Image (cartoon, rainbow, N blue to C red):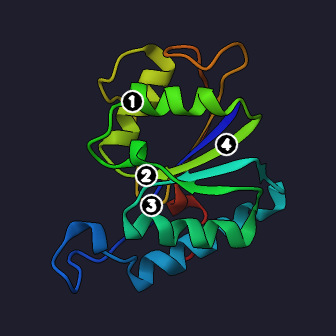
Amino acid sequence: MNLLVIRHAMAEEISQTGQDKDRPLSAKGRERFNQFCKHLSFLDLQFDLLLESHLLRAQQTADIFCKYFSVQQRERSNNLDPSSEPESLLLELASHNLNSIAVIGHQPFLSRFINFCLTTDEEAFIIFKRGAMAFLDFSLAVQPGSAQLKSLLDPKYFIKK
């Protein structure tokens, strides 16, 4: 399975409701993530499934992502919330038995998840910036420590300031 892990784009510091789950993307975050996706659109990426967290900023990031890349199915997952456990998301991914999946979530969970996929250890050694993407390949089995990191893309190298 090919897995694209995406951290949501830059969001507002607070929401109108005062709740973290309702924080929208900032104008700068929308603009930068659009630019980043546009620069990568030549890759013609296609995904069987896009999983996103229930938080507004992840959903808005997914909306932008879907404008540039082919996504067959889109779902929300509780396993992508900031306090989720890496093993739970990995089990959910394995249960889908698909070739290509993208996920959009939050820190610090995503760094812990990527490390768990690569090494079985949740200790974060990858710095995952807002709007960044990591391509993982599970060529043998979708299980802890079996992934290979194919690429880690920081949006700052693809956008105009």
Image position, residue 89 (x, y; %): 46, 34
Figure check: 154 above or below 14: above
Labels 4 and 3: the sequence-earlier one: 3
SS for callout 4: strand
- 3D distance between C-alphas at marks 1 and 3: 17 Å
C-alpha distance separating marks 1 and 2: 12 Å
Q: Residue at x 15, y 78 (%)?
A: 18
Pick the residue in front: 39 or 44: 44
Q: 152 above or below 20?
A: above
Q: Quadrant of residue 63?
A: bottom right
Q: Image point 62% across, 74% down: which residue?
A: 35
Q: Amino acid at mark 1?
A: Pro
Among the two numbered marks 4 and 1 on one chain, the one whose residue lies closer to the N terminus: 1
CB atoms at circles 3 and 2 under 8 Å apart? yes
Q: Which residue is mark 1?
A: 86
Residue 101, numbered label = 4
> Is residue 147 visible in the rendered structure shown here?
yes
**Number of numbered markers:** 4
The residue tagged 3 is: 8
Residue holding disc 2: 105
Q: Residues within 10 Å of mark 1 (few under 14, many from 20)?
A: many
